[in-house]
Image (tube, rainbow, N blue to C red):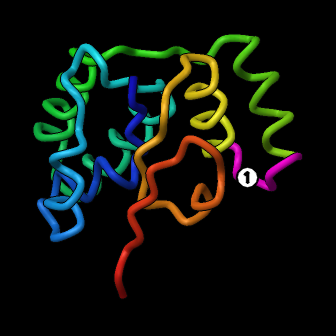
């Protein structure tokens, strides 16, 4: 199972050079874990940058993956990870969700760079 963080989704969706490097690592939808917080972040980004129609299509695509709703156990784990690793709330939820599902994280977000089970692709300036 692989959790693709919002930052990697965006790079893939805009087909940036980084997105092209990430594309071969993307799993089959049956192995692609999508936390509901990532759906939120993608919907916000896509609506702002691409318009509501394309945002709806992106969210529809995520629904064909493995959806991971935020439950109490994951929220409590996220709270501990927030404190332990100094993560933002959304990042802590993403990381806790990956741990709960025994998944690795594919990301371009430097906040995850040194955490276990993270496949980090650095953005180039």
**Mark 1 element type:** loop
Residue at the (55%, 20%) spot, across then down: 102
Residue at (70% x, 52% y) in the render: 88
Indicate the quadrant where residue 25 lies.
top left
Q: Which residue is mark 1?
A: 87
121 in the magenta segment: no
Specify whether 3 is left or right of 95: left
From the viewer's perspective, is residue 73 above or below residue 108?
A: above
Magenta region: 84-89
In the image, residue 55 sits, relative to residue 112, either above or below, namely: above
Percent of width and height locating residue 16: 16, 67
Q: Residue 97: give x, y in percent of width and height.
A: 59, 25
- Residue drawn at the location 56% of the way across and 28% of the way down: 98
Name the quadrant containing residue 114. Answer: bottom right
In the visual, does 102 lie left or right of 76?
left
Labels in figure, total: 1
């Amino acid at each position: 199972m692989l959790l693709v963080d919002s930052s990697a989704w965006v790079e893939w969706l805009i087909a940036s050079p980084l997105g092209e490097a990430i594309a071969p690592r993307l799993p089959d939808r049956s192995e692609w874990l999508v936390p509901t917080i990532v759906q939120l972040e993608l919907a916000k980004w896509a609506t702002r940058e691409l318009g509501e129609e394309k945002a709806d299509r992106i969210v529809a695509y995520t629904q064909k993956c493995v959806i991971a709703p935020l439950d109490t156990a994951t929220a409590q784990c996220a709270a501990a990870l927030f404190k332990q690793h100094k993560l933002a709330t959304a990042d802590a939820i993403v990381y806790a969700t990956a741990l709960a599902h025994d998944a690795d994280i594919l990301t371009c977000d430097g906040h995850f760079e040194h955490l276990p089970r993270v496949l980090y692709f650095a953005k180039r300036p």
